[in-house]
Amino acid sequence: MTYLIDLLAIVNGLALLLVLILLLRGPFRKFWIVLFYVSWELLATVSLTIFDVLYNGPAQVHNVAHADAVRWYARLYWGNDVIVDLFRFLLVIVLTYQATPAGVKRLSIGRVLGAVVVVAVGLPFLLFPTGPNPWPKAAWFNSTSELLNFGAAIMNLGLWAALLANRQRDRQFVAVSVGLGVVVTGTAISYGLRHFIAPEDRSIPDLFLMLVQLGAWTVWCRAFQPAPVRHLAQGNALQSP
């Protein structure tokens, strides 16, 4: 199971890199928020992997150094995990605002979306007290990530409603929304499963999460894939005298 998860992690990284390349070659101005999100997640994944290989692995020779490396890796991992989940939530908010038809109501909708972001940032600290420790435990990060992804999945329904209400809806926008809905919903389910699964069986939700992410990146690859250029037949291109 571990080897399968590692293999899927590599495939996920390559798929995310392909999404980044397709974005840079295509509509990166239109989906600038997606570009920032993909760039951050790809850079963070590579950085955490390098940290794990260079510091966590060799430090196993010394118990004190190994414990210190594991502690810092856990902090970086969980801290980045919440940042990525918050980024996804903001991604839904920005795309929802962009999909809202221009008009008087758009300003009001923007204010409501801004208030939703403020609530989403402060709600984890109210629902999940961190305690006297200066750094929250892994359970706090797990619950916060679950909350953010669950909230993003609900807000993504609002994005779909905005797209359906817009008569001039963009099919590419719809495809990006579908991929985003897949990843936030699947991530929320994966974190929820961890509450009911023993620690030694955590590979099951991890495998599910890898498959969900791969599906989402595949949808985005299809969404950002350049449209095929249609060449006219040579016979039709020639004008008769």
Image (cartoon, grey):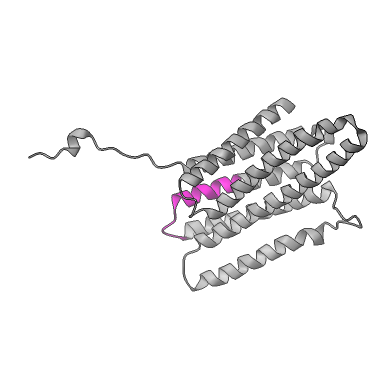
Q: Position of residue 70 (x, y in %)?
A: 84, 39
Note whether residue 155 is visible: no
Which image quadrant: the C terminus?
top left
Vertical arrangement, residue 89 with respect to residue 197, above or below: below
Which one is nearer the viewer's eye here, 111 or 134?
Answer: 134
Q: Hey, which quadrant is residue 196 in on the image?
A: top right
Note whether residue 84 is visible: yes
**Residue 167 relative to residue 144: left or right:** left
Count the marks.
0
Q: Position of residue 228 (x, y in %)?
A: 37, 39
* Residue beneath the point at 58% across and 41% down: 216
Which one is nearer the viewer's eye here, 236 or 160?
Answer: 236
Is 176 magenta? The answer is yes
* Residue beneath the point at 84% across and 39% down: 69
Q: Hey, which quadrant is residue 168 in on the image?
A: bottom left
Is 136 magenta? The answer is no
Q: Position of residue 20 (x, y in %)?
A: 54, 43
**Residue 131 relative to residue 104: left or right:** right
The magenta segment = 166-182
Q: Position of residue 59 (x, y in %)?
A: 85, 33
**Residue 230 relative to residue 137: left or right:** left
Vertical arrangement, residue 42 with respect to residue 88, above or below: above
**Residue 37 relative to residue 59: left or right:** left
